[in-house]
Image (tube, grey):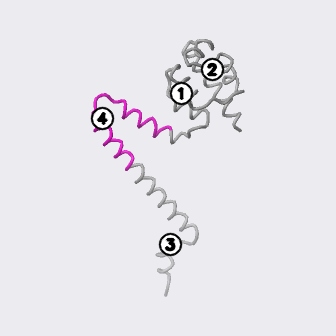
């Protein structure tokens, strides 16, 4: 199954390289990897490390998180969180203190929503297991 992710990653990298109008050699040079190694990644024969993916992303001017998702290192939900944080941190119109406060608020909302989702899932599981206590007590005569 890992080779499937690597193959998808290779196809994706090749597509991004062609979109950027770079030869294999040009991308390899820009990313600081060997030409044969990059060729093996594109053909799905090698699984690059997160560091190599980051170098490739920088050379292609795309998000490293996108490559992490393609490689199966990061799932889609994690990528959304990482990208949101990156956008906040990159915003030049707000101060560093404002960025940190905004990140704290964002994280508190995420935790609150996760806790609510967990509670909802628990309540739903309890209902399926035998109904709620209110239903069983109202039917007594």
Q: Main secondary structure of the magenta part?
A: helix
Q: Nearer the viewer, residue 126 or 45?
A: 45
Element at label 3: loop
Label 4 close to label 1 by CB (< 8 Å):
no
Image location of residue 3, percent across then percent down: 71, 33
Q: Secondary structure at mark 1?
A: helix
Q: Residue at x 50, y 81 (%)?
A: 139
Residue carrying label 1? 54
Sequence-wise, the earlier of marks 2 and 1 is 2
Mark closest to the chain's N terminus, 2 or 3: 2
Seen at 56% across and 40% down, the residue is 75
Please give the residue where the numbered disc 3 appears in the rendered image. Answer: 132
Label 4: which residue? 96
- How busy is the neighbourhood of tag 3: few (under 14 within 10 Å), some, or many (20 plus)? few
Crowd rating for badge 4 (residues with CA inside 10 Å; few <14, some 14–19, many 20+):
some
Choose mark 1 or mark 3, whichever is in front.
Answer: 1
Segment tinted magenta in the rendering: 79-108
Q: Which residue is mark 2?
A: 14
Q: Residue at x 52, y 33 (%)?
A: 65
Are discs 1 and 3 less than 8 Å apart at CB? no
Q: Earlier in the sequence, mark 2 or mark 4?
A: 2
Q: Does the magenta segment cover residue 98?
A: yes
Q: Earlier in the sequence, mark 4 or mark 3?
A: 4
Separation of residues labelled 2 and 1 (CA atoms)? 16 Å
Q: For marks 2 and 3, give the CA distance.
A: 55 Å
Q: Nearer the viewer, mark 2 or mark 3?
A: 2
Element assignment for label 4: helix
């Amino acid at each position: 199954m890992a080779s499937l992710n690597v193959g998808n990653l290779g196809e994706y990298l090749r597509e991004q390289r062609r979109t950027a109008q770079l030869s294999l050699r040009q991308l390899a040079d820009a990313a600081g990897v060997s030409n044969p190694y990059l060729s093996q990644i594109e053909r799905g024969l090698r699984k690059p490390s997160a560091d190599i993916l980051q170098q490739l992303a920088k050379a292609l001017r795309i998000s490293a998180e996108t490559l992490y998702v393609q490689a199966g290192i990061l799932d889609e939900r994690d990528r959304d969180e990482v990208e949101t944080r990156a956008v906040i941190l990159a915003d030049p119109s707000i101060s560093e203190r404002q960025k940190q406060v905004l990140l704290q608020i964002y994280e508190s909302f995420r935790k609150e929503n996760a806790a609510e989702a967990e509670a909802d899932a628990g309540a739903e599981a309890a209902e399926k297991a035998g109904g709620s206590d209110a239903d069983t007590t109202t039917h007594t005569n």
